[in-house]
Image (cartoon, rainbow, N blue to C red):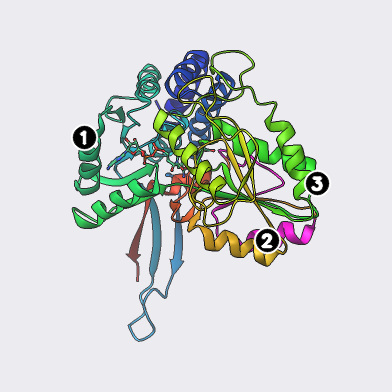
Amino acid sequence: MHRGGLLKSWASHIRQNKKDLATLMTYECGKPLPESLGEVEYGASFLDFYASECLRPNGLGGGTIIPTPFVKPPSVKNTRGTVMTYNEAVGVCGFITPWNFPLAMITRKVGPAIAAGCTSLVKPSELTPLTAMALEVLARRAGVPEGVFNVLTLGEEDTRRFGEVICTDDRVKKISFTGSTRVGKILLKQCAEGGIVKKASMELGGNAPFVVFSDADIDVAVKAAMASKFRNAGQTCVCSDRFLIHEDVEEEFLEKLVGEVKKIKVGDGMVAGVTMGPLISTKAREGVEEKVKEAVANGAEVLVGGERHEFGEQYYMPTVLKGVIKEDNIFKTETFGPVVASMTFSSDDEALDIIKSSSKTGLASYYCTQSADRMFNFSRRLEHGMVGVNEGIISSVVAPFGGVGESGIGREGNSSGMREYLEEKYVFVNHN
Ligand SMILES: NC(=O)c1ccc[n+]([C@@H]2O[C@H](COP(=O)([O-])OP(=O)(O)OC[C@H]3O[C@@H](n4cnc5c(N)ncnc54)[C@H](O)[C@@H]3O)[C@@H](O)[C@H]2O)c1
Ligand SMILES: O=CCCC(=O)O
């Protein structure tokens, strides 16, 4: 079967098993069932997209032919000839993925890899191996041959070894990692120290700023903030984390936001009506708790939440903090929890200065305004790979997803995501 056909068939098997896959994910990582169902669709969309992409002229089959009589510098005798370029598959790929999107972070890599003609070995998070194994079973049923996409589930120690092997073994030509900046840097160092120089994509941590300007439509801003902050209980790399609210609208924004936060129903993700599940572990909950305590000790005010949730060890209450300072860990580092950490600002320059001086991450950023000037110009001043204006959910198969700075290298999704799996070869034919 054509590679596009295989990807389409795999997407269709995933959709036929949507409910089972979503249930597995909710049991494994705790996100509410409707969010898991959304992730199944999101994950399948990468296979559909790249099934079509590999048929496009600029996909693998594409290339260019450039007739040119002048390929050498003027000092050298001119040669008449033709420049031809081909896109070729990079080769064997090694992937490492996280627990927060156990399905979509795999298809977002494997989809374009297969479309480009690459084979891949995936090591999912040790916290969510079952979703990955189910994906592999469905790939086989769809006809994806063994050896083209394989899953390797490993414990912590073997995981480190796997990382070393894919970074240093010359047979692996590309690695793609989604996870923390800390581990991303370990992998980059390993790549630099051993074996051939290879392509590396790094989808790393966030800590997204969310700016509410004084001219924002506050209802729109609250809706965007809720969507971006509380998705997966705050455990996504693109969740808004650092809230900067213009001093003139702080009261209105926070009052409306707190009203919405109080409506969040925390509990077992399998129960209908629950909109927020647990954090991934007790350790993760303790980490959030510690950061909130530090901010409060430094003067922040808890408007809602601020404590462990009574539902269980891994649960934390949806929380809104007012008056944090940029030195607080909850502001300057990625929190991966359901906490709005907010402070005020009085000018665009001040907001930018706070954003840039408090973190070197550059994944997603968000701002709300009704000014056309700001809509186009403020995003240019932000050092982030992705910007949402008056919108809290910006992830989509058609968009190039990725960050700059401490948030990584490379893009996933869109045709940019396919380019990461192709090498351009140039051939010159002399026909003097
Ligand atoms: N930019 C993105 O697209 C994106 C998407 C999802 C998550 N993330 C980030 O991922 C982080 C959360 O995920 P996590 O807690 O699973 O991250 P993590 O870095 O702890 O783990 C990610 C993966 O790396 C593996 N790993 C851990 N140590 C390793 C080592 N020494 N060598 C090789 N592999 C190793 C883990 O087993 C897991 O599979 C957050 O920082 C989040 O922002 C980023
Ligand atoms: O956690 C980061 C990935 C989530 C997304 O693709 O929106």
Left or right for 162, reference 37? left
Q: On the image, numbered disc 2 is attached to which residue?
A: 378
Task: Kindly identify which numbered label has been placed on residue 157.
Answer: 1
Within-10-Å neighbours for mark 2: few <14, some 14–19, many 20+: some
**392 drawn magenta:** yes
The disc labelled 2 sits on which kind of residue? Phe
| Image location of residue 110, percent across then percent down | 40, 35
Question: Label 3 is placed on what type of residue?
Answer: Asp
* Front residue of 283 and 19: 283
Within 10 Å of the Cα at label 1, are there few (<14), some (14-19), or many (20+) other Cα atoms? few
| Kind of residue indicated by mark 1 | Glu
Residue at 72% in and 32% down? 260
The residue identified by callout 3 is 217
Q: Which residues make up the magenta segment?
A: 371-397
Residue projecting furthest to the bottom = 75
Judge: label 3 CB < 8 Å from ligand 2.
no
Classify mark 3: residues with Cα within 10 Å, few (<14), some (14-19) or many (20+).
Answer: some
In this rendered view, identify the residue nearer to me: 53 or 311: 311
Q: Is residue 301 left or right of residue 76?
A: right
Q: Is residue 132 visible?
A: yes
- Badge 2 or badge 1: first in the primary sequence: 1
The numbered mark, 1 or 3, whose residue comes first in the sequence reads 1
Name the residue rendered at 76%, 38% in the picture.
256
What residue is rendered at 57% in x and 30% in y?
317
